[in-house]
Image (spheres, coloured by chain):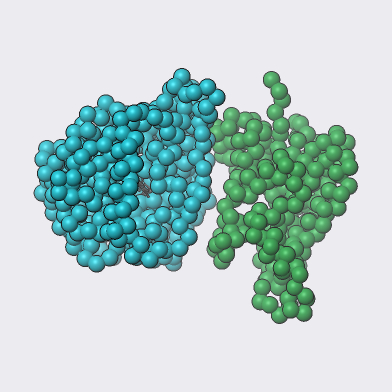
Chain colours: A cyan, B green
């Protein structure tokens, strides 16, 4: 048994970790225990990537099967990391259509969470660009699933958090790009309402996201910086510029767990003040940034999760339907600022409709907050959850480690349909994760 | 069109081989992958073609079948520019202490086979006037340890072979690289207790090999820390060393 946790380092759980070398060995690993789930690169924050009994590490499956340089269609094994795809195919003029805030996620993990990027409001989630998958079901079969063939399995797997089986391979489309640069425009706004209006106005931008200063209070509550972005065309680069600057491996690493006192209301306040002022200074004009700092600002520091100390941290990411969102988000932010040990990182963005049955996105605004694991934080987050549920919103499973069954059930009305499909793929119930045990498996361990 | 360079990777199905092949293909080399079962190498060959738009072929090669070496080497469609041997077998020290057959397999897989095949290519390269030969040995060959001296002694022999070959071949324009990885996270070391800061990913080894070939380095300790560790370990007097549980 090995102690395993997600990126937030809470909870830490004992599980067998297996590294099969072949698809056949994956099948044997699934068949051999009643409670297995696949794990990609462990970037889900909570307990989604941890098997009830057994966890299958997928990163060794990192081969590209085929690539069409004309259409950008690619077939690959599910353990390939997006960072690897970007490094390999970026210089050849292709990028993933959707990338989350870190590039160190696997294709399997990106499908399982149907991850959203800064373009979800106009281009949808990761799953939209997946044409088909090869799935090892709990039942023991290997099936190809697409929108046409085994479509139930396909739509349950996109966003299904690994609970329909192990994704072995995927065929997907990459986005043709002329450069590895983003044309970025920063807009600074003085409060939450203005931030939401700026995001609405940015609807036509390919990429948009707001960074919220969640220390600012009163009339400044929700003041933020909005980052809008477009892919730069080749003609927009100055002569001699490198068309595709590659991302460097993280140069900085957090070597040890910092005492959790490092992050306190004073250090966060000082940081946020500085960050806001620097951003506001750049506001207005449009400038060129490499795609790496634009999409993956946190990737330049490896193991930054250690900043929060050994007890780890929790992310709370909710989505609130558009109608009435202003009031609910204002209420949440106010409680967070009042509490004081606010999140270091608060991100607000607009989402469109999700594609999978359990996909997190729905039309509305999503707010993501980090909290160090200490004190009465669990109670506080339950309190926030009640506001989310009342507003008809939901929490993101890839970030969750603690929501209640009731919160989950209220947020995901398609759960019954998902369960039925899952059962048809896995009568004996071989596939189970710590997350599914916590939130919806009927048989408790 | 300028003709591309070719690298031959012996022991093609290991994690280090996959990583090394990728490093060379990324740098524009066509790749010949050789392993005991050529069929299982196809996914790796396909991966190289899809990623880097290079040619990748696969060949059957068994390091224990020394009688086949000449046929294998002359059967390749083109004499490669670079030959890399990543063949090795860790084996089980404890069984090797009493099981002569197992000990023989370890010795032959880590010394006899790799040395003979690289020696053979060295002759062909010398006749042609250029080429690079890479042998992946091990820090375990720097000093015999109680816990793995069967493997270590074979690697020691291989390292000595490579250094002698280097001295001779350099005059003929042929460069010999000795690579000494320390702990690498691979299927060979799966389940072993590795020392975190001294352990590297296979891709780091692959990149280091490419780098050594391009810069014509003689001996590479993949993690610089190992050079220091081994310097200390080699310097320990035998009287002290034998008392250490190492
Ligand atoms: C800094 C940071 C920023 C992030 N930003 C965003 C963001 O902007 N948008 C967003 O959507 N997400 C974001 N995330 C979350 C992350 O994208 C998801 O958690 C993603 O699923 C992680 O992929 P992984 O390969 O690490 O998978 P893991 O964390 O290992 O697993 C995640 C889920 O995928 C399943 N899974 C993994 N591989 C397979 C497979 N082969 N077959 C079946 N199931 C599988 C697991 O069972 C688990 O349920 C962020 C995470 C971090 C750490």
- Is A9 left or right of A239, judged from the image as shown? left
- Quick check: can you spot residue A207? no
| Quadrant (top left, top right, bottom left, bottom right) of the C terminus of chain B | bottom right
- Locate residue A181: give its quadrant: top left
Give B231 or A185, whichever is nearer the viewer: A185
- Locate residue B186: give its quadrant: bottom right
- Give residue A250's position: percent from left, percent from top: 49, 48
- Is B238 left or right of A31, judged from the image as shown? right
- Locate residue B2: give its quadrant: top right
In the figure, A269 relative to A2: above or below? Answer: above
Give A109 or B183, whichever is nearer the viewer: B183
The residue lying at 33 percent from left, 39 percent from top is A279
In the figure, B246 relative to B176: above or below? Answer: below
- Give residue A361's position: percent from left, percent from top: 25, 40
- Quick check: can you spot residue B119? yes
- Give residue B143's position: percent from left, percent from top: 75, 67
The residue lying at 70 percent from left, 60 percent from top is B227
The residue lying at 31 percent from left, 53 percent from top is A270
The residue lying at 36 percent from left, 31 percent from top is A184
In the figure, A285 relative to B139: above or below? Answer: above
- Give residue A34's position: percent from left, percent from top: 36, 60
- Is A354 left or right of B204, judged from the image as shown? left
| Quadrant (top left, top right, bottom left, bottom right) of the N terminus of chain B | top right
Give A366 or B132, whichever is nearer the viewer: A366
């Amino acid at each position: 048994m090995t102690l395993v946790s997600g990126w937030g380092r809470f909870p830490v759980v004992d599980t067998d970790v297996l590294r099969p070398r072949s698809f056949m060995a994956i099948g044997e690993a699934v068949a051999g225990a009643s409670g297995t789930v696949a794990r990609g690169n462990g970037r889900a924050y909570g307990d989604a990537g941890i098997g009830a009994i057994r966890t299958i590490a997928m990163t060794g499956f990192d081969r590209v099967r085929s690539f069409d340089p004309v259409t950008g269609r690619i077939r690959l094994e599910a353990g390939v990391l997006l960072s690897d795809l970007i490094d390999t195919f970026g210089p050849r003029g292709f990028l993933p259509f959707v990338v989350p805030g870190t590039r160190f996620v696997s294709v399997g993990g990106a499908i399982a969470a149907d991850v959203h990027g800064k373009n979800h409001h106009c281009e949808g989630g990761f799953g939209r660009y997946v044409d088909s998958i090869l799935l090892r079901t709990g039942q023991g079969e290997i099936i190809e699933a697409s929108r046409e063939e085994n479509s139930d399995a396909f739509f349950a797997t996109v966003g299904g958090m690994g609970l329909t089986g192990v994704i072995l391979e995927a065929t997907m489309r990459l986005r043709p790009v002329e450069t590895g640069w983003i044309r970025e425009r920063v807009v600074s706004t003085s409060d939450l309402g203005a931030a939401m209006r700026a995001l609405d106005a940015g609807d036509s931008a390919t990429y948009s996201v707001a960074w919220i200063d969640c220390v600012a209070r009163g009339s400044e509550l929700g003041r933020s910086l909005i980052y809008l972005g477009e892919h730069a065309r080749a003609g927009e680069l100055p002569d001699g510029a490198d068309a595709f600057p590659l991302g460097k491996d993280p140069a900085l690493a957090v070597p040890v767990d910092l005492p959790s006192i490092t992050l306190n209301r004073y250090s966060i306040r000082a940081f946020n003040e500085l960050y806001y002022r620097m951003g506001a200074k750049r506001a207005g004009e449009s400038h060129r940034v490499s795609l790496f700092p634009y999409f993956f600002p946190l990737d330049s520091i490896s193991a930054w999760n250690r900043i929060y100390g050994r007890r780890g941290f929790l992310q709370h990411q909710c989505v609130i339907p558009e109608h009435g969102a202003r009031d609910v988000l204002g209420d949440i932010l106010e409680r967070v600022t009042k509490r004081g040990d606010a999140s270091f990182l608060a991100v607000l963005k607009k989402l469109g409709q999700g594609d999978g049955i359990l996909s997190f996105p729905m039309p509305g605004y999503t707010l993501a907050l980090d909290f160090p694991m200490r004190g009465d934080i669990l109670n506080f987050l339950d309190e926030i959850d009640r506001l989310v549920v009342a507003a008809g919103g939901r929490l993101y499973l890839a970030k969750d480690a603690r929501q209640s069954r009731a919160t989950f059930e209220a947020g995901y009305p398609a759960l019954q349909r998902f369960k039925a499909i899952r059962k048809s793929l896995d009568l004996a119930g071989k596939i189970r994760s710590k997350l599914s045990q916590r939130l919806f498996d009927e048989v408790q361990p | 069109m300028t003709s591309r360079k070719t690298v031959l990777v012996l022991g093609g199905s290991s994690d280090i081989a996959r990583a090394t092949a990728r490093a060379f293909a990324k740098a524009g080399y066509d790749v010949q992958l050789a392993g005991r079962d050529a069929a299982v190498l196809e996914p790796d060959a396909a991966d190289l073609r899809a990623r880097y738009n290079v040619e990748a072929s696969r060949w059957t090669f068994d390091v224990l079948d020394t009688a086949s070496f000449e046929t294998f080497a002359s059967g390749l469609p083109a004499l490669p520019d670079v030959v890399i041997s990543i063949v090795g077998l860790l084996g089980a020290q404890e069984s090797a202490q009493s099981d002569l057959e197992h000990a023989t397999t370890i010795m032959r897989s880590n010394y006899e086979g790799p040395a003979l095949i690289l020696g053979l290519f060295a002759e062909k390269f010398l006749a042609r006037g250029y080429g690079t030969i890479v042998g992946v040995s091990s820090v375990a060959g720097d000093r015999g340890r109680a816990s793995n001296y069967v493997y270590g002694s074979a690697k020691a022999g291989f390292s000595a072979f490579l250094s002698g070959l280097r001295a001779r071949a350099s005059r003929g324009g042929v460069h010999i690289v000795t690579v000494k990885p320390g702990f690498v996270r691979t299927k060979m070391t799966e389940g072993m207790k590795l020392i975190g800061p001294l352990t590297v990913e296979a891709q780091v080894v692959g990149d280091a090999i490419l780098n050594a070939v391009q810069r014509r380095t003689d001996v590479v300790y993949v993690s610089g820390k190992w050079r220091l560790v081994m310097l200390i370990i080699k310097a320990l007097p035998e009287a002290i060393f034998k008392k250490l549980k190492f």
